[in-house]
Structure formats: C-alpha cells, structure tokens
Image (cartoon, rainbow, N blue to C red):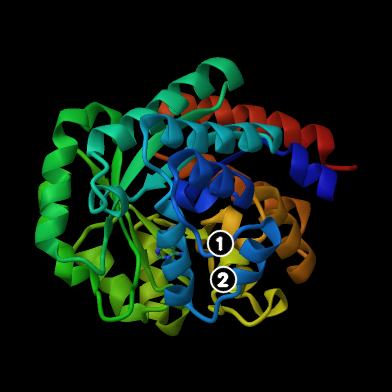
Amino acid sequence: MDTFINNLPKAELHVHIEGTLEPELLLKLATRNNIKLPYKTINEIKNAYDFNCLQDFLDIYYQGAKVLITENDFFDLTYSYFEKSALQNVKHLEIMFDPQTHTNRGVTFETVISGISRACDMAEEKLGVTSILIMSYLRHLSENEAFKTLQSSLPFKELITSVGLDSSEKDNPPSKFQNVFKASVKEGYIPVAHAGEEGNSDYIWEALNLLEIKRIDHGNNCLQDINLVNEIIKRDIALTICPLSNISLKVVENLEDHPLKEMLQLGLNITINSDDPAYFGGHINKNYQKIQQALNLSKLDIYGMAQNSFKYSFLNDDKKEQYLNDLEVYYNKNIDL
Ligand code: ADE
Ligand code: ZN
C-alpha cells in the first residue's frame, strides 16, 4: 500500500510555503542573513516543535520565517519544496504564501513573489510540476492591513490565482474580511479560507456565505452541523484535510479518531495535504500513509482522494483532464498489487 501511495500521481492543495522551511535550511538562512535564533542545532529545533494548539505553532512559525530576507531565500525555500514534491509524485502544487509575515519586517512584496514565482517557473521547466499561488491574508491583523496587501499584489496579479485566509482562527471570524474578499474577487482572485480548524461550524457558514469561498481549508468542524455538511456537498466544494497537522495542533487527539472516514461516508469531497510539513513531521505521502493505516482506507478511497486533488484544483479543465487520465491509468495498472 505504501508503494501504491508513493507512486500515486497527486496534487497538493494546502501547503504554506513558510511551513516548508526545514530545520537545515532554517539554520543555513539564519547564518547567511546573520539572524539570531533561539536554537543552534537541528535537535534543539525539533525539540521546540511541540505544540498544544494552533497559536503555539504560529508563534514558532512566524519566528522561523524571519530568516527569509532576499529573493534568493524565497527561491531556495520554494524550489527545495518542489524537489521534495517531485520525488513524492506530486504533479501539481497550490502554494499559499503569507505576504504580511514578510512585509511587516520590511521585506517587499516584490522580493517575496519574485523568489517564489521564479522557483515555480523553474519547477515546471525542470521537474514538470505545475503550480498556482494563493496569497493568504493573516486574520489576526485588521481588514485594513489586508487591503494594503491586496493593493501591493496588483502589479503581480498575473502571478496569483487565489486569495486565502489563515493564522489565528479563534475570535477572527471570516466576517471580519468580507470587504477585502469582495475586492479580491473583483480583481480576479479565487477565494478560499481556513475555516473550522479551531473555529466552530459558524465560521464555515460565514466563509461560504460571506466570503463565497470555492474550497475550505481544514473544515473539520463542519461535522458539528449536518445542514452545513449537506450545503458543502450541494455546492460541490472540497475540504483540504491535513491529518498530521491535526495531530500536531491537537485538533484531533490521535489519527485513529480522525473524522476523515466519516467525512468520506457522508459524501464530502476530501483531499489530503501536509499544511506545514517541516513542522508537523511529514510530507504529503506520509499524510496519505498514516491516515490510510489509522483508518484502514482502501485503494479506492486513496484513489478517490487523489482524483479530488486534481478535480478541485484551480487548473483549467484540459489540464485537469490530462492529470486525471494519467491517474486513472496508474490506478488500473496497480489495483491488484
Ligand atoms: N498558517 C500556517 N499553517 C496554518 C494553519 N494550520 N492554520 C492557520 N494558519 C496557518
Ligand atoms: Zn493551513
């Protein structure tokens, strides 16, 4: 089964580029940019990655991001994630980035997007992995701050497909960002949002009805309300589920209790993703493998979620069809292994 998962063609729809900063690169960039960190060794870093909730993680994640200064840093970070993804048979990546994490430290929007998008171009050319970018607003900041970010993004609009909402969910409901999402959609960005990770089902309703999101990041707490589950299915919207993230951030106590199987049984459209793989102990294939083992998922379940990863991507229909055909060929060849 692990080999079936490793070789399975797949897309990843929920990964924060800042969350792919592995300890080795963190130390290297800290030295390169002369940034002081509270740790000196890989072991010290790994010991610090022990979280009780989303906020515990975010504090460490924002601290780590401070080593990213130059266009080259953003390129190195992004390209190294493409290399890892290619080895895991990821064919397409939808990458979130948090401009405010960097612009608030004096790094320009242009520096961030130039480094990331240069890596995306090179990855398509050299590794054959396609990608799109999701610019995410930090929800612990004000809507006015998000408007400034939207404004800064406009000269680079052609490089950005989608707009998202992340960071501390509690007490920062989607309704706080209703106006900036409306303006972002007017600029052509497709709206998505983290909702129902720590927040309750009301936040998912708000994200659907006020932000008109086209995909739900996490969405675990939709199970609190069967009417919401049915609405998500009716709208044909997918959830980007992140199993190892849910364990690290104590959204779910252990993988055997993860609601993913129940979600599949209810008819929700589920995809599997890594969220912040450098912090949560595993890349995409490990997320597939661990949840498969914990819930005894079948090859058909795994195939269905890989299909969803392409179907609910923001690729055009031709490209989706091409990827789905390749996946079908793979499945038919490996079904009896
Ligand atoms: N930013 C990076 N990872 C996140 C997560 N899991 N939830 C909210 N914001 C995030
Ligand atoms: Zn996330």
At x 30%, y 49%, the residue is 102
Q: Label 1: which residue? A: 242
Residue 273, percent across and down?
56, 53
Element type where label 2 sits in the image: helix
| Count of numbered labels shown in the rendering | 2
Quadrant in which the C terminus is drawn: top right
| Residue at the top extreme, as displayed | 125
Residue at disc 2, CB closer than 8 Å to ligand 1: no
Q: Position of residue 196 (x, y in %)?
A: 40, 73
Specify the amino acid type for callout 1. Cys
Asked if marks 1 and 2 touch (Cβ < 8 Å), the reply is yes
Q: Is residue 51 above or below residue 38?
A: below
Residue 68's quadrant in the figure? top left
> Where residue 2 appears, x then y in whole percent?
82, 49
Q: What residue did someone put label 2 on? A: 246
Residue 274 in view of the camera: no
Q: Specify the amino acid type for callout 2.
A: Asn
Quarter residue 174 falls in: bottom left
Does residue 242 sit above or below 108 in this rendering? below
